Image (cartoon, helix red, strand yellow):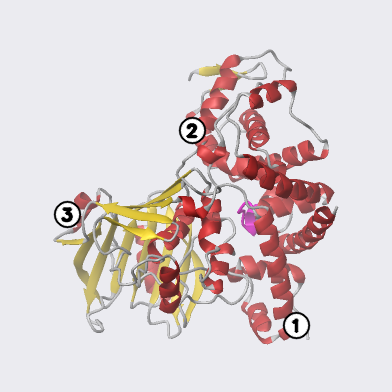
Amino acid sequence: MTSLPDARGGALPASTDFEKFFRAEYPVIVRIAYRILRDAHLAEDVAQDVFISAQQRFPEPFGSDHAQAWVKVASTHASLNALRAGRRRTARQERAFEISAPADPEELALASEDGREVRTALARLPRHAATVLVLRHSGLSYAEIAEAMEVRVGQVGTMLRRAEARFRKEVDRATRS
Amino acid sequence: MRHVPDGTLRRFIDEPFAVTDRDTGHVSGCARCRLRCQRFAEDATAAAQRLEVPALVDADAGFARSRALGSTAPSAGTTLQFRPHRSWRLVGASLSTASAAALCVMLVVVAAAATLTAVFTPSPAPPAPVSSADIQEVAQVMGLNTTASVGGFRTPSGSEKLPFGTLSWTSSGRSEQVASLTAAEAAAGMSIVVPTTLPNGVGGADRYEVMPKVEATIDFGAMVGSSLSGSSLQVSLGPAVAVSYSGSSMIDGVGTLGILDVARPVATATGATVSQIESFLLSRPGVPPGLAEQIRLLGDLETTLPIPNLPGISSGSAVIGGSRAVVLVDGSDAASGAIWEDQSGVHAVAGLLDRGDLLSVARQIG
């Protein structure tokens, strides 16, 4: 089996199994991160981080329910961490961003305002509430959420209901401020 | 009276089949729980709208980037390098079947395909079936001819002017009947699995029909404003193969069993995102609010399989070949159908069979 140098200095197998896993899960993981961060570049950065960690943790992740659940929760937590820490682009990322194609200003303004309210509301939610909210609205079933968050499936509905009620209040609050 | 707990009621909105019959029955008979359900659904919808994000992500580019990051081999402990990449708005990618199927509803059903009187489940409220009047209403809004034939389009290829652009479609020909399963597979370029053991009363396969691949495109004109002007949405649907079975209990020429295999639909958007286009289409004045709401309530279309929701039909679920299927059964359990999706496409089985016989057929295919 061929090996690629690891971005963190180790050796990672260029695994076909991992590639299948990556291709299947990457769009989902990016979208989870984007839901929270509202920044396509940061979302892809988070996803790349998540998959590097996943590759170290799960040598053969394809078909593993545990690996699938893990990357989704990892993406949610990493994005919430980035959001709450107020992490901004590094100087390197800024440089990269500047040379990419400029977006439509009108779209940017609308997306920016809506994104600000969502980010603010998510940052104010308890972590488990933000997690269940994002996972559910990323399309995970109740059983998948239970697996990912290591709770009983019967608890998911209650957690989700509370999270949505709180999210609505926080969005209203962010909209007024 | 014991009311349904919050968590169960919330799950009822998303996964009604996972809730006990007792709770479901309670909700339908309890005004207070219905009101709570409505409030929960409103919050869920509001959250879904706020958390909606573009559907198009380029996994190939992501993987290439991942490999490139690996090959740069920075020293241990350094942060990852991030490279500029394409804007999401310009990325066209294959969507999941469900998302594309929903778009097909907009493109094909909305083009007045009377046979596809959509639409969707699950939904927060008791699902509102979409009538042919709804379809005609939408077709009028879209400026489409309502006399379209089965499949949505009158001719193998053509175009129509819409109030907001142009709808054009092409296909390799008309639907055709062929003589055998082998011929159908050859014509469609698909491998079709049929059951080897048939329930009592079901005769042999007697009709094979091949529907060609259809590609439809909406090009948005300048009249839609800066947000969508110049954008386009392409949906590729099919090919599909339908196999019908004869039998002793034929009713008015309807076969006892039918099997449909459809290749995974693909949707591609350029200029604007698919969700922007969907929002635009659903916001057209005159679109029946019930239909628009049903489509919006699907939430994340990538994980939701839209299925017909017809009056008098109860729905349930089953696992077929490792995939979750939606099972529809009529009130007398004399007719039933199942639809599911796997890597090879979307599959449907329906017939004058009870649920048990139907699933025995479906599980030979899935």
Location of residue B300 in the rendering, given as x and y in whole percent from the top left corner: 58, 55
Q: Residue at x 68, y 34 (%)?
A: A42
* SS under mark 3: helix
Which residue extends farthest front?
Answer: B223
Residue that carries the numbered disc 1 in the rendered image: B32
User: Mark 1, chain letter?
Assistant: B
**Marks 2, 3 in one chain:** yes
Is A139 one of the magenta-colored residues?
yes
Is residue B19 left or right of B155 when viewed as pictured? right
Pointers 2 and 3 in contact (C-beta within 8 Å): no
Amino acid type, mark 2: Asp
Amino acid type, mark 1: Arg
Amino acid type, mark 3: Ala
Q: Is residue A137 above or below residue B45?
A: above
Location of residue B265 in the rendering, given as x and y in whole percent from the top left corner: 39, 52
Residue that carries the numbered disc 2 in the rendered image: B60
User: Mark 2, chain letter?
Assistant: B
Distance from the alpha carbon under mark 2 to that under mark 3: 35 Å
In the image, B66 versus B319, the foreground residue is: B66
Q: Is residue B38 above or below residue A17?
A: below
Residue B183 bears which disc, if any? 3
- For discs 1 and 3, the disc positioned in front in the rendered view: 1
Which residue extends farthest top?
Answer: B75
Location of residue B6 in the rendering, given as x and y in whole percent from the top left corner: 76, 70
Q: Earlier in the sequence, mark 2 or mark 3?
A: 2
Span highlighted in magenta in the image: A138-144
User: Which image quadrant for residue B209?
Assistant: bottom left
